Image (tube, rainbow, N blue to C red):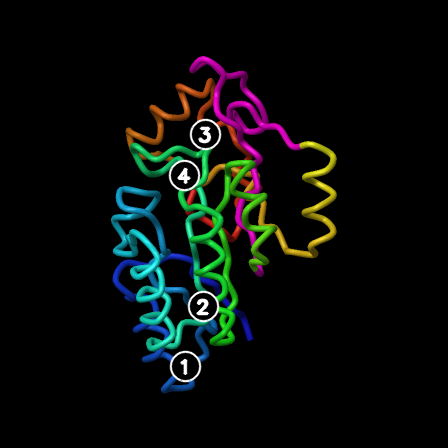
Amino acid sequence: MTTVRDLGDRHFTVVARRDAQRQVDDGLPWIVASGPPITTPGGHCGFLGGEVSGADEIVAAVRERIERQVDVIKVMASGGANTVGSDMSVPQFSIEELRLLVEQAQAAGLPVTAHAHAAAAVDQAVAVGVQGIEHAAYLVPWANGAGSVGLVGLPDIHATDAQLASLAASGIPVCPTTGGSFVAPPPHVEKRWRMLGSRASRCSRNARRCCGGW
C-alpha cells in the first residue's frame, strides 16, 4: 500500500479526509496526517490555523491534536520562505517551549516533526528529542543584513562539525528538501528568492522532496 504523509493542513482538513477515507477500502494511499502545524503568532504557516503563544496554548494545541487522533505533530521551529515576515535564520520558540511541546506529545505516544531551517532551531530540535527534522538547512542570521549565497540560494549556511556530529548521533531522520518546489512561485516567494540571489526555478525539478512547507 502507498502511504502519503501530510505535514500541514488548514483547520484539520486532511485529518478529516483521512478519517473518512479509512472507513472504506478504496485503494487510495494511506494518509499520515498532522493537522495544522504548531507555530507562533504571525509565524511560518500561521495562516493554516496553528498559532500559539506561551505554555498554556502549546499544551492546548497538543491536546487538541491528541483528541483528533493525528498521526504526527508538526512544529515550525524556525521561520520559512513561504511566509512573509518570518525569519528562516532564527528559532520561533524557546527551547523550553519546544521541550514542553515534545514532552506533551510523547506522553501521548505521538511523534513530533520539526521544520527547522535555522541552525539554532536544528540544535533545539536535537536537544529536545524530536522524531524528525524537515530541511535542517543550518541557516545563521546575516551579518549586517548582507549574507553570502549558499546551498540552493539560501544565505549563510553554517554547521560546525560538532553540530553535525550531534545530529548524526541523535539518529533523528532528516528530510532535506534539497530541490525546488515551484513551477511558478507566488510573487512574495519569487521576491524572497531574488533577494537571496537565486530563483526557485533554478533548482532541480527532479529533486523535489516529500516535506513541503519551505
Q: Which residue is mark 2?
A: 104
Q: Which residue is mark 4?
A: 80
Image position of 61 (left or right of 172): left
Mark 2 vs mark 1, foreground winner is: 2
Amino acid at the residue labelled 2: Gln
Quadrant in which the C terminus is drawn: top left
Amino acid at the residue labelled 3: Ser
Residue 26: numbered disc: 1
Amino acid at the residue labelled 4: Gly
How busy is the neighbourhood of tag 4: few (under 14 within 10 Å), some, or many (20 plus)? many
- Verify whether residue 73 appears in magenta: no
Q: Earlier in the sequence, mark 2 or mark 1?
A: 1
Mark 3 vs mark 4, foreground winner is: 4
Report the residue at 57% width, 42% height from top: 136
Q: Nearer the viewer, residue 203 or 132?
A: 132
Rendered position, 130 above or below 27: above
Q: Earlier in the sequence, mark 1 or mark 3?
A: 1
Where is residue 168 shown, x and y percent of the image? 72, 49
